[in-house]
Image (cartoon, grey):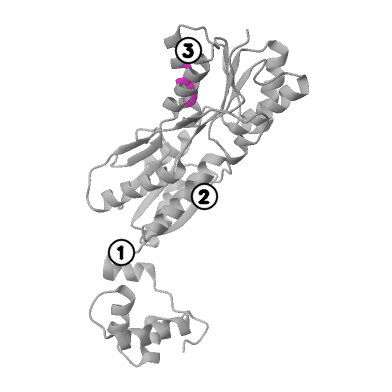
């Protein structure tokens, strides 16, 4: 049994069973021939001692650690948090475990420190959830000895980085076209923070739809992702004059907007149609039910792991663009103006 408070080692397992270190290594790494009886005894000793293989040592033997590093932000917003859950789930289904580093600063040094941490774990690949320009730029400046997959970013990474993202612009265009089909012609865009790639892409989709329809565009209201920003924007639109329809940065902003309209006696969709983006679970139950754009994060996670598998097999760098889906509910209706 291990002494001096140190964790149990492979040698401790071998001593308890009465076999060689190499026999235990074969069982742990699944390589080499070991009789079923001996394998059972080794596994029993591993459980009894609480032995856990060292990922770096295992990687030296098998060239596989089974670890995927994930860099994300400390943001609790729906998109990044949902993406992290999807990645952890799909990685586990593919036989990997994730090691997560959440950053609140995105300097080159911060990202380099995260990459160094993953190197110490012998991670086989690194996935970076990169919704903001500063994080994307820091990732692009890195050199890594393992494949790097960027998720949700629009930055031109180069250096052999595969990109997996949702077609945010296409989703916003489809939403705008839905509102146009209802007869709306005067649109407002309550946008998110422009240092976020997805916020810019959603606003760009709105602008493209307006340009193609030959319609004038109101100056977008640019703010945050929170409901508090939607509430402030709603109050401002009531004071300045309501449009026919409003496209919000995300569902949370739309909820804040709906609250401001309810206080002001504005009918949705009677006086104005309101739409969000993301299709959070609450969207179906707020107000009249929120028309929004659905992102399939599980599908995005599967694509990220596909990119990892392809990279580990020596495949080419690729960009995966996943579609969105329009979800029409009661918050949008025919224009009454």
**In which quadrant of the rendered view does residue 124 lie?**
bottom left
Give the extent of the magenta segment: 202-207
- Few, some or many C-alpha atoms within 10 Å of disc 3 (few <14, some 14-19, many ≥20)? many
Of tags 3 and 1, which is closer to the observer?
3
Residue beneath the point at 52% across and 27% down? 194
- Identify the secondary structure beneath mark 3: helix
Residue 299 counted in the magenta span: no
Q: Image point 23% across, 43% down: which residue?
A: 316
On the image, numbered disc 3 is attached to which residue? Answer: 210
Q: Which of 322 and 218 is in front in this view?
A: 322
**Between 269 and 217, which is closer to the camera in this rendering?**
269
Residue found 46% across the figure and 43% down from its top: 297
Which x, y percent locates residue 258? 68, 26
Residue 332 in the image: above or below residue 250:
above
Q: Visible in this render: residue 32?
A: yes
Name the one closer to the observer, 111 or 169. 169
Nearer mark to the viewer, of 3 and 2: 3
Q: Residue at 38% of width from left, 42% of height from top?
A: 150
| Residue 146 pos. (x, y %) | 31, 52
Gap in angstroms between the C-alphas marked 3 and 1: 51 Å
- The reply to whether callout 3 and callout 2 are in contact (CB within 8 Å) is no
SS assignment at label 2: strand
The residue beneath circle 2 is 102
Question: Tag 2 or tag 1, which sits nearer the N-term?
Answer: 1
Report the magenta stretch's main SS.
Answer: helix
Q: Which mark is residue 120?
A: none
Residue 132 screen position, x and y as percent: 48, 35
Which residue has dot 1 on it?
64
């Amino acid at each position: 049994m291990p002494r001096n408070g140190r964790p149990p080692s492979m040698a401790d397992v071998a001593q308890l069973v009465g076999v060689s270190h190499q026999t235990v290594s074969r069982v742990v790494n699944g390589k080499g021939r070991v009789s079923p009886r001996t394998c059972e005894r080794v596994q029993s000793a591993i459980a009894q001692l609480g032995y856990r293989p060292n990922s770096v040592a295992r990687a030296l033997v098998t060239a596989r650690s089974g670890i995927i590093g994930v860099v994300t932000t400390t943001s609790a917003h729906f998109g990044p948090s949902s993406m992290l859950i999807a990645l952890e789930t799909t990685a586990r289904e593919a036989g990997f475990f994730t090691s997560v580093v959440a950053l609140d600063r995105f300097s080159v040094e911060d990202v380099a420190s995260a990459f160094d941490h993953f190197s110490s774990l012998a991670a086989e690949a690194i996935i970076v959830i990169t919704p903001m320009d500063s994080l994307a730029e820091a990732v692009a400046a890195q050199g890594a000895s393992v494949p790097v997959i960027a998720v949700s970013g629009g930055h031109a990474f180069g250096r052999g980085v595969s990109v997996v993202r949702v077609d945010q612009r296409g989703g916003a265009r489809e939403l705008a076209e839905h509102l146009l089909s209802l007869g709306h012609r005067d649109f407002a865009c309550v946008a998110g923070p422009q240092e976020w790639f997805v916020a810019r892409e959603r606003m760009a989709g709105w602008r493209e739809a307006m340009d193609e329809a030959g319609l004038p565009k109101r100056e977008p209201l640019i703010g945050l992702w929170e409901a508090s920003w939607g509430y402030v924007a709603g109050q401002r639109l009531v004071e300045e004059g309501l449009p026919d329809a409003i496209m919000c940065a995300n569902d949370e902003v739309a909820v804040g907007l709906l609250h401001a309209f309810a206080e002001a006696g504005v009918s949705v969709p009677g006086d104005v149609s309101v739409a969000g983006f993301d299709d959070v679970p609450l969207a179906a139950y707020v107000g009249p039910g929120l028309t929004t754009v659905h992102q399939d994060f599980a599908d995005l996670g599967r694509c990220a792991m596909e990119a990892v598998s392809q990279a580990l097999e020596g495949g080419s760098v690729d960009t995966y663009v996943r579609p969105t889906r329009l979800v029409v509910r009661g918050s949008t209706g025919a224009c009454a103006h």
